[in-house]
Amino acid sequence: VLDGRIHRGRHLLGGEFGYMLYGNDDTVSHLGTIVNAADRYNRANGTDLDGKALYELAKTGQPLAQKAVRDMLQVLATTIFNLQYSLDPDCFVIGGGISQNSDLLADLNQALDVVMAKVEIAPIRPIVRIAKFQAEANLYGAAVNFQQHQRSR
C-alpha cells in the first residue's frame, strides 16, 4: 500500500516481494516462508510437518527445526530491512497463516536485531506489525481493492 492505495505497478507485480532474489541462491518466497521452510525440513529429515508444527518443534529446542525457522526468519528480516531502505514505508504488516503464531513478532524482531547490527549506519529500524485479520488479511485486501477499483470507474 502506497499513499493509502494498493500499488499494482505497471505490470501488476507491485508488492510481489517473494519474487526478489535472496543472495544468489533463491527467491524470497522460497527461502523466507514457513511453508517452504517446513518443506525443506521434511525433505532433509523424512518428516511430514506443516509450518505450524515446524515452528512448534523449534520452540521445544529441536536443533534442526530451530535452524530451519531461524534461517527463514533471517531471510524475512533481511528482506524487510532492504524494503525499508528502498521504499521507506511507515511499517510492514505480516498476514497469512504465520501471522497467527503468537511468537512471530518477537522472533522476527530478534532477527531484525541481527540485521540492524550488521548495518550500523542504518538509522531507521523497520516497524513490523501483525495484520488485524491475520490469515484472512488477503481476503479483506481483495475486498478493499475491489471497492477502490469500483470507485475509480
Image: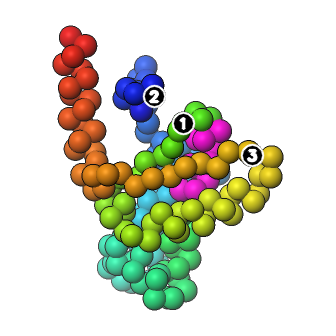
Mark number displayed over residue 2: 2
Region rendered in magenta: 75-85
Residue 147 sits above or below residue 130 on the image: above
**Mark 1 vs mark 3: which is more N-terminal?**
1
In terms of sequence position, does the residue under pointer 1 or pointer 2 come before the other?
A: 2
The quadrant in which the N terminus is found is: top left
The residue lying at 28 percent from left, 56 percent from top is 135
For disc 1, the marked residue is: 89
**Viewed as shown, does residue 3 lie left or right of 84?**
left
> Label 1 neighbourhood size at 10 Å, few (<14), some (14-19), many (20+)?
some
Instruction: Residue 37 in the image: state x and y as whole percent.
Output: 45, 67
Q: CA distance from mark 2 to mark 3?
A: 22 Å
**Residue 25, visible in the rendered structure:** no
Amino acid tagged 1: Pro
Residue positioned 45% across, 66% down in the render: 104
Residue 14 seen in the figure: yes
- Left or right of 63? Residue 146 is left
> Taking 90 as reference, is 98 above or below it?
below
Q: Nearer the viewer, residue 121 or 73?
A: 121
Q: Residue furthest right?
A: 121
Q: Is residue 84 magenta?
A: yes
Place of residue 119 in the rendered image (x, y in percent of width and height, measured from the top left):
77, 52
User: Are discs 1 and 2 less than 8 Å apart at CB?
Assistant: yes
